[in-house]
């Protein structure tokens, strides 16, 4: 699974959980959804190190 697919999955899960948390007015679910959004954002900074060119 590529990093982009993982980011998109985290974003989709975050959106679903956050939306459900808003719908049922559960602050814990809302915060968990926001945590998934944050994880997707932080994943942007973990890039593969490129091997040095010869």
Image (cartoon, rainbow, N blue to C red):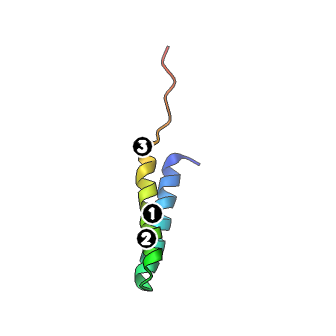
Q: Are marks 2 and 1 in contact (CB under 8 Å)?
A: yes
Q: Position of residue 25 (x, y in %)?
A: 41, 84
Q: Residues within 10 Å of mark 3 (few under 14, many from 20)?
A: few
Q: Which residue is mark 2?
A: 31
Of all residues, the one furthest to the right in this rendering is 1
* Circle 3 or circle 2, nearest the eye: 2
Image point 52% across, 53% down: which residue?
5
Numbered disc 2: secondary structure: helix
The circle on residue 35 is 1
Q: Is residue 21 visible?
A: yes
Q: CA distance from mark 2 to mark 1?
A: 6 Å
Q: Is residue 15 visible?
A: no
Q: How many marks?
A: 3
Q: Which residue is mark 3?
A: 45
Q: Residues within 10 Å of mark 2 (few under 14, many from 20)?
A: some
Q: Nearer the viewer, residue 51 or 38?
A: 38
């Amino acid at each position: 699974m590529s990093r982009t697919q993982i980011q998109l999955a985290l974003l989709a899960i975050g959106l679903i959980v956050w939306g459900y948390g808003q719908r049922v007015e559960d602050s814990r679910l809302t915060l968990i959804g926001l945590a998934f959004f944050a994880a997707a954002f932080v994943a942007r900074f973990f890039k593969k190190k490129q091997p040095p060119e010869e």
